[in-house]
Image (spheres, helix red, strand yellow):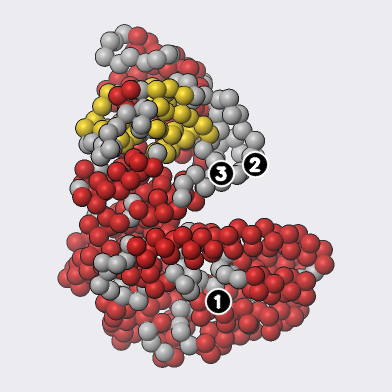
Amino acid sequence: MLLFDEFTYDKASALLRMASTFLTEKLFIKGISSYLKKFSFSNADQDDLWNHMQMFIDDQDEVQLPTSLKKIMDSWTWQKGLPLVTINTSTGTLTQDQFKTAYADNTTSDNNHTWIIPISWMKNGIQQPTVWLDTKTKTFPEMTTMDNEWILLNINVTGYYRINYDEKNWDNLAKTLEEQPQVLSVVNRIQVIDDVFTLANSGYLEYETALSLTRYLEKEMEVIVWYIVLKHMHYYKKTLVTYHSFPLIKKYILKRIKPIFQHYASVLQRDFDETADDFFVHTGIDLIFKTACSLGLQDCLSLASGIYTKWMANTSNNEIPQSIKGTVYCYGIAEGGEKEWDHAWSVYNKSDLADIWDYSYLKHGLSCTKEPWLLYRYLDIVLFDGAHSLMDTFTDMFKNDIGRHIAWEFLKENWHRLKDDASVGETEILFEKLVTDLGWKATSELQFQEMQLFITTAMDESFQENEVQRLERRKKARLEWVNIVNTKIIDWLQKNTLDSDL
């Protein structure tokens, strides 16, 4: 096991940012600069850093800490995970506990551990003095609120913790976003959305609470905020789309996504280079376009189809912006037919296709066609020629309804060919991955029975027992979630799509 991995470095940077905030940037830089100079040619550990910086803290009166910097930072560096801070705005009581990604998680943890947490906060949009949560529970009378008041903790997300509010405060934050979304900064809008969906996905909150904070999105024009929302709403274990919910999801999302789509569609048609310096636009715009197209927004489908047609006419001069190539290839092929698919297949197989991203986008685009016979032919070619990844092809097809049905039928018809052409280990890995993907898309007991039959028929006996047990666990979680979507979430969507004109 690595002593230092990406999580170690990510946590370290988050903790240093938190420290620079509660110490103030001026004091932090002063202490860090002196520390780096003193230890520039010698070994040092974290205690050297905290003790050195403590000298500068003791030498001023502006910043007052509840205890030594070492004790504060040790409460973070020697404890895994991160805290969940919960506030009751009726009493002003804060509590802390370790955040778990699943509320029923059986992972062992030190439930007696206490972080020393700096709580920056605002009340009704007005920033308040920072307080410290240095016990498991602590009451701050100034954090009580009246009916229409609201509180936001962790301003600008400088603290390394998640936050859960009581139902009243979540409701008031949702109303504030609907009335005046700019009262919260972009980073705090991201924070509120990310916290509420993460908590709902982990069982701390009802999912309807998370959805209530999306009602305002028709006014949201920041790509990065939309990106976070859609990443959560596309979460494969908690997808909101079933055959029953799709019409309501379509109405609800399209009404809200249409303004930001139209804005960037017009920028694209005018001059997309206007966004060249905006990292967040190029990170998140494809997910916005993909969602609009997948929900059938005709403006999006026409745009993708038109750009794809122009590219077909002049393939050597590919002017499709890199950040939306995935959507253009996918829906250009989906809106076309055999000609569009064959063109993409020809380009995909060119040996001089050096752009790895272009290669990946084309590969996925080939699975987007709505023609079942083309999908079947695609799988047959990939299985026969051995030059392309069968695993990747199946995985791409499982991402859309038509492709998933064709791929599943192909798999059932050809599993013996797959076993003949690969080693037992390779085949079992393929079958395991595909059954796992299918399990998160299944919506009925019968579909799970069909998958179990496949496992006991096609997989090697040494793998069967574990795979059947895994499938049973997945079935329970999946069917419980489908039932929630088809009852409670559909009920919520019906109440919140009455004003939709789409």
Q: Mark 1, mark 3: which one is toward the viewer?
A: 3
Sequence-wise, which precedes: disc 2 or disc 1? 2
Sort mark 3 into few (<14), some (14-19) or many (20+) by Cα contacts within 10 Å.
some
Point 22% across, 65% down: residue: 259
Label drawn at residue 103: 3
Estimate the x, y position of residue 366 in percent, counting from the top left. 47, 79
Residue 98 relative to residue 315: left or right? right
Give yes or no for contact between labels 2 and 3 (Cβ–Cβ under 8 Å). Answer: no
Q: Mark 2, mark 1: which one is toward the viewer?
A: 2
Estimate the x, y position of residue 404 in percent, counting from the top left. 55, 76
Point 43% across, 50% down: residue: 197
Label drawn at residue 106: 2
Which is more toward the observer, 154 or 447?
A: 447
Residue 7 relative to residue 166: left or right? right
Which is more toward the observer, 273 or 269?
A: 269
Tell me the quarter of the image containing the N terminus: top right
SS for dot 1: helix
Tell me the quarter of the image containing the C terminus: bottom left
SS for dot 2: loop
Give the amino acid at mark 1. Answer: Arg
Label 2 vs label 3: CA separation?
Answer: 9 Å
Sort mark 1 into few (<14), some (14-19) or many (20+) by Cα contacts within 10 Å.
many
Estimate the x, y position of residue 56 in percent, counting from the top left. 34, 13
Point 82% across, 67% down: residue: 461
Give the amino acid at mark 2. Answer: Asn
Q: How many marks?
A: 3
Label 1 sits on residue = 404
Quarter where residue 416 is shown: bottom right
Quarter where residue 187 is shown: top left
Point 54% across, 60% down: residue: 481
Sequence-wise, which precedes: disc 1 or disc 3? 3
